[in-house]
Every structure is written in structure tokens, then in C-alpha cells.
């Protein structure tokens, strides 16, 4: 039995219930954010950027396997090695990633796991400062400050906002107040930074279902009920 013939044999009330469930399913399952867990193995969906005197590191950013949420299981994460190009005192420089998403009006929660891992031999005075921005407004910040060599530090960014419908920008900025060190043949003592599991949720992420699909189901149900009444 095809899906069409099955639907034709349903009552209007049943088809209406199915349509309601379909709306709920689409609202729950849909997410306008692309590649928030970097499982594509690259930065698909994201645009990289640098600050005026900043760098993401030679050969960075990329996507590598790393235990960013410190749960003992590694997964694909965006990796950076940020810092300044030219030293200017008390200036944080680096860069990051951003993505534009089309959202509905309502509540929006944004969260992400972040981490920093120290260089190979020497300790470093800055593991990196992470900032979560929404439409260029900083919503959350975490600074790893000093970090030891070959040691991982872990945290997360999170925010809750009430937004209007439309296209909005979600941006992650990672900076350090020091130069991004050169890359010697044997080792590099500039810390690396990681972002993973970027998730957006809330009523603002609920999609609007296709009206033609819902109306089509209701029309089929109406025809079905009409046919049953004529036979009776």
C-alpha cells in the first residue's frame, strides 16, 4: 500500500492530527545552523576572519580530532593557533569563525565547548580568550589566562537571548595578547585553541512548515471523508 492510498483511507481528524505532528516534528528537528559539530571534517558553513593585527596561525584554522568537552572521547573540532603579527602592548589579536543564520522571533540559546592546549615545552602566559558574539554584540567571554606546556584547559560559552526574526550572525572570536610564535621544525610552544559542539536552540530556531504539504494532507482527508459519506 502506498503512502498516498493510506492517507486517502484516513479520516479528516486523523489527517489533521498527522499534520499537527508533522509541524511539531519539523519545529523540533530543524536547525538553521550548519556544521556546528564540524563532522564534515572541515569548516563547511563557517567563514574565517582575522583581526587587523591578528593571525589564526600558519596552517590554521583546520578541523582535527580533539576532546574539547573533556569527556574522554575525541571528536572533530575547529583548531586555531591565534596571536599577534606585530607586538602592541595590551592588544588582544587573533580571529575566528562566523556564520549567518535565518531565525524566527523568540528565545535563542547558543552554546559551545571550548578548550586550549599548551605548547610542547614551555608554559605560556595566555591560552587564549574566547568570545561569543551575536550580531557583533559580545554575549559571553572566557579567558584561559596562563597555561602549562602539554596541558589541556576546558570550558564552554553559553548565552540566552530574545531575538527578532531575520538573518543574524553568530561569531566566535579567539585572541591572545602575545605574538603567534614561529613554527620550528621540532616543536611549537604557542598554545592551540579548540571549538566544538556549537548548538543553537529555542523557539527562534523553529522552522515554519511548508503550507502546501499541510494543505495537501487536509485536502486529501476532506476528499476521503466526503467519499465515505457518499457511500454511506
Image (cartoon, rainbow, N blue to C red):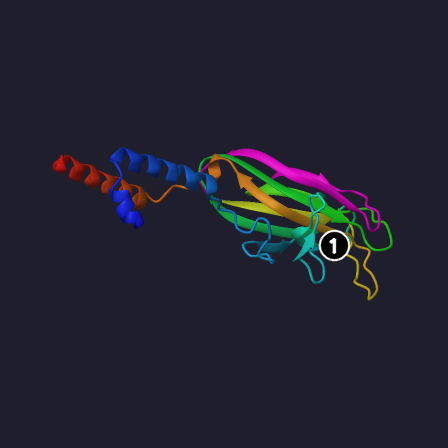
Indicate the quadrant where residue 13 lies: top left
Residue at disc 1, secondary structure: strand
Please give left or right for residue 216 compared with residue 146 in the image.
left
Residue 152 is inside the magenta segment = yes
- Report if residue 7 is visible in the image: yes
Residue indicated by mark 1: 84
The image position of residue 198, as x and y in percent, is 59, 45
The image position of residue 47, as x and y in percent, is 57, 55
Query: Which segment did they paint magenta?
Result: 138-166
Quarter containing the C terminus: top left
Dominant secondary structure of the residues highlighted in magenta in the image: strand
Residue at image position (79%, 58%) is 181
Please give left or right for residue 103 compared with residue 77 in the image.
left
123 or 25, which lies in front?
25
The image position of residue 24, as x and y in percent, is 41, 37
Q: Is residue 32 above or below residue 20?
A: below
Please give left or right for residue 31 compared with residue 69 in the image.
left
217 or 59, which lies in front?
217
- Report if residue 92 is visible in the image: no
The image position of residue 3, as x and y in percent, is 31, 48
Residue at image position (60%, 42%) is 133
Please give left or right for residue 200 compared with residue 223 in the image.
right
Residue 139 is inside the magenta segment = yes
Amino acid at each position: 500500500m502506498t503512502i498516498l492510498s493510506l492517507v486517502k483511507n484516513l479520516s479528516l481528524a486523523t489527517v489533521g492530527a498527522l499534520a499537527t505532528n508533522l509541524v511539531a516534528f519539523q519545529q523540533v528537528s530543524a536547525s538553521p545552523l550548519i556544521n556546528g559539530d564540524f563532522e564534515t571534517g572541515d569548516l563547511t558553513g563557517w567563514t574565517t576572519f582575522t583581526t587587523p593585527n591578528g593571525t589564526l596561525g600558519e596552517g590554521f584554522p583546520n578541523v582535527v580530532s580533539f576532546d574539547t568537552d573533556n569527556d574522554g572521547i575525541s571528536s572533530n573540532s575547529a583548531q586555531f593557533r591565534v596571536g599577534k603579527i606585530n607586538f602592541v602592548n595590551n592588544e588582544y589579536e587573533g580571529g575566528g569563525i562566523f556564520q549567518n543564520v535565518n531565525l524566527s522571533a523568540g528565545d535563542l540559546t547558543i552554546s559551545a565547548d571550548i578548550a586550549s592546549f599548551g605548547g610542547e615545552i614551555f608554559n605560556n602566559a595566555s591560552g587564549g580568550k574566547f568570545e561569543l558574539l551575536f550580531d557583533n554584540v559580545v554575549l559571553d567571554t572566557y579567558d584561559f589566562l596562563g597555561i602549562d606546556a602539554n596541558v589541556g584547559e576546558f570550558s564552554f560559552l553559553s548565552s540566552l537571548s530574545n531575538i527578532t526574526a531575520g538573518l543574524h550572525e553568530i561569531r566566535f572570536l579567539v585572541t591572545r595578547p602575545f605574538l603567534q610564535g614561529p613554527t620550528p621544525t621540532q616543536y611549537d610552544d604557542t598554545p592551540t585553541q579548540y571549538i566544538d559542539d556549537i548548538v543553537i536552540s529555542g523557539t527562534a530556531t523553529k522552522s515554519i512548515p511548508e503550507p502546501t504539504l499541510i494543505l495537501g494532507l487536509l485536502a486529501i482527508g476532506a476528499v476521503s471523508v466526503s467519499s465515505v459519506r457518499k457511500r454511506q
